[in-house]
Amino acid sequence: MTAQAQLMNMARSAPRPECEEPLVIIVDDDPSIRDGLHELMLSAGMHPICFASTKALLEADVLDRPGCLILDVRMPGVSGLDFQQQLVAKGKPKPIVFLTGHGDIPMTVQAMKAGAVDFLTKPVRDQTLLDAVTASIERDAAQREHAQVVSLLKARFETLTLREREVLAEVARGRLNKQIAFDLGISEVTVKLHRGNVMRKMQTASIGELIRAWETLSASLRSPAAN
């Protein structure tokens, strides 16, 4: 099993407190729609919570919880599409299922390009909506697992010295030890020593794993300016 697979398994197997169960956040200004969706989610064993507007949702401070959003498009105040754009701009994308009685092709394209899981028109079959919500929760879980892996790798990367980071960057480029030694003005023996330290600190068992770990790190962290 690779080091990255082990990290993913650790993320999946970590006990999840009750408050971290996936939450289906329903935002619709029609109380009858909210009530109906709430009952549907409960019947499927999910954990729904309802709001009449995106403003009320923000005041509740539940967006960081695992789960997904069911959003109406047209609502008083900030619309569902505008709210989606705000989340993307803040770097806090969350899986969204749009459910609207006023959809059109341009709206659908905009929503899907911004990362929506689905764009459904009222009335919608219960199973179609439940399938979209299930897919959204699965996407959120995958995104959170990936974020945990990135966080662990980032913490390991930050234990590297500047020289070790330089050697890692060169290894990731496919450079040989003697080429790295020439480029950095150090001996080949020293390069081997640094590379061994890098693999130990990054907890990788092969060069392939080391390169995958490097590629998982954000571009800003891999940038020479960040070192």
Image: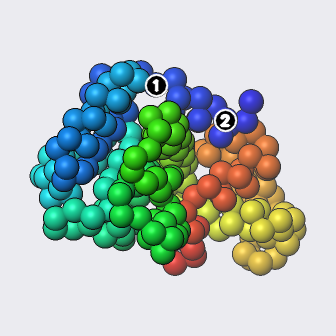
Mark 2: secondary structure: helix
Residue 83 image point, x, y percent: 29, 64
Which residue is found at the position 72% from the left and 75% from the top?
Answer: 184
Q: Amino acid at mark 1?
A: Ala
Q: Nearer the viewer, residue 42 or 12?
A: 42
Residue density around tag 1, few if under 14, some if 14–19, many if 20 or more, within 10 Å = few
Classify 203 as above or below 77: above
Residue sitting at the far front: 123
Mark 1: secondary structure: loop
Which residue is found at the position 78% from the left and 55% from the top?
Answer: 192
Callouts 2 and 1 close, C-beta under 8 Å: no
Which residue is found at the position 59% from the left and 35% from the top?
Answer: 8
Q: Amino acid at mark 2?
A: Ala
Label 2, label 1: how far apart the Cα atoms are: 14 Å
Q: How is the image coloured?
A: rainbow
Residue 29 image point, x, y percent: 19, 53
Classify 92 as above or below 50: below
Dividing the image into 4 quarters, which one contains the N terminus? top right
Which residue is found at the position 74% from the left and 46% from the top?
Answer: 209
Q: Nearer the viewer, residue 42 or 88?
A: 42
Residue 67: tell me if it is visible: yes
**What residue does disc 2 label?**
5
Left-right relation of 179 to 68: right
Left-right relation of 88 to 134: left
- Location of residue 178 by image quarter: bottom right
Residue density around tag 2, few if under 14, some if 14–19, many if 20 or more, within 10 Å = few
Residue 44 image point, x, y percent: 41, 23
Left-right relation of 34 to 114: left
Instruction: Pick whichever of labels 2 and 1 is earlier in the sequence.
Output: 2
Classify 127 as above or below 103: above
**What residue does disc 1 label?**
14
